[in-house]
Amino acid sequence: MSTVVILPTEGDLDQRTSTDDEHTEQKKTDLPTTDLPTKDLQVLHSTHTVHIATDAEKQLTPYEAAQQVVARQDVHIARVWPMRSPSTAPLEDSSSASFQDGRTGISPAGVMPVGGLRMTQAFAHEPVMANEVVDLFAPVPPGLVVDATLGGAGHAVALLDAYPEMELLGIDRDPRAVESATVRLAAYGSRATVRRSRFDGVGPIVFEHLGAVAGDPRAKVSGVLFDLGVSSPQLDTTDRGFSYRRDAPLDMRMDPSSGRTAADIVNESPENVLVDLFTDNGEGRFARRIARAIIAARPIETTGQLADVVRAAIPAATRRTGGHPARRVFQAIRIAVNEELDQLDRALIDALRLLKPGGRCVVISYHSGEDRLVKAAFHEAATGGCTCPPGLPCVCGAVVDYRLVHRGSRRPSPAEVERNRRSEAARLRVIERIDHAGSERPDTQTSRRSSHGEVA
């Protein structure tokens, strides 16, 4: 198939206005020029020249050229990403760089208009399932509530506003989050305290805050909240190295001042360690292929390099579905860098011990590994560690001090998912310490358990 390009003559151009002349001359300079054999040139009219171009000489659009590169197996793809065209539509007044289009209502605190866009100048993060969290803490006794993953203090503000008698202790390891939350919570005075720490330090921090020692029965709290995973500001800040969509140094540390970086894990871990890491985080099918590709490409220093290596290791047919091919790999490396699952196991044990009767522990997780840990810890507490067969009376002497507030996990509402796409993976679980005051401890010999082994 050939392409016909017709060049206007000087006679045609003389009939145009001066403005049209400038436009036409620019168009002429934009046309491709090629030295062709005489046989490829034909005169159709005295005033027009026809250039017959072959298929090989046809100029491709940038998108078509990129698609051809992607299809080639012998070429290493440096960076080829689909790009959105600039929008010419008016911006919604409530939207910002950190919040999805279509949001309605009051803009988040700390949001200032900048150059026609609304962009947050703080560690702003829309709290996931905030209404559900506030409702779940309504029945707890007065006292201290611990937000063990404070972040931008979104949940903390919602709780302090809803319950004037509540005091809150916020914990976070990210120095930027601590700085921002401290400023945001200053308006609440002595009701809010912020400490910088990993969340598995919740026990010692609570004891210090209450002026008690470990094991002191008076050192109890009314509630503990965990909102796990990485926050939107961490993902959206390029130099943190959390996102596969932004090229940056491989870091991924929530506390940039300590610990191994993602680059350390990627470049130093043996193949079997990487395979186990990726398999545990849902990438079992291609875990070994990805691990071998990473080892072959070392050293890998940036998120862009890692994303390209992972993408190239996955078959093209699989890449077309299921989201970005590097998503699970980045998640697995981030969890390993920050030792999130190891910390969570210890933190849940301490959090349950800290609860006073009637107190609640609420956990929002975004990853199946996290949710499995939470589910197992809550099941152990709600059954007292009973080893008897499900559906039969307990005869092992287990003591039940906790109950599940609801069976299974809760998910965000469709309206919230539409407003905040990053909330879609959220799973919320809640457990309450039983208040035995005024009644005898339940007879564990006759405690009824469901077929799933949970307290009925």
Image (cartoon, rainbow, N blue to C red):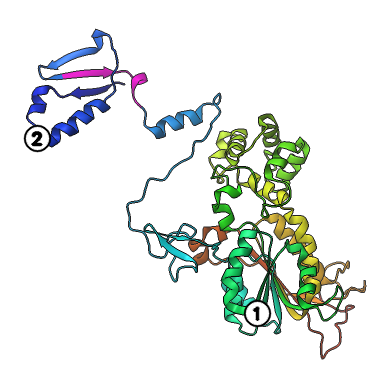
Residue 368: give x, y in percent of width and height: 68, 55
Q: Is residue 263 left or right of residue 103?
A: right
Residue range in magenta is 49-59
Q: Please rate how many residues cluster around mark 2, counting C-alpha atoms within 10 Å: few if below 14, some from 14 to 19, many from 20.
A: few
Nearer to us of marks 2 and 1 is 1
Judged left or right of residue 262, residue 386 is: right
Q: Indicate left or right for 296 with 414 as reference.
A: right
Crowding near the residue tagged with mark 1, few <14, some 14–19, many ≥20 C-alpha atoms within 10 Å: few
The quadrant the N terminus occupies is top left
| Callout count | 2
SS for dot 1:
helix
Q: Is residue 79 above or below residue 327?
A: above
SS of the residue at dot 2? loop
- The question of residue 55 being in magenta is answered with yes
Q: Which residue is mark 2?
A: 17
- Name the amino acid, label 2: Thr
Q: CA distance from mark 2 to mark 1?
A: 75 Å
Indicate yes or no whether the magenta region holds residue 284.
no
Q: Which residue is mark 1?
A: 190
Q: Quadrant of residue 316?
A: top right
Q: Residue placed farthest to the bottom in the image? A: 438
Amino acid type at circle 1 is: Ser
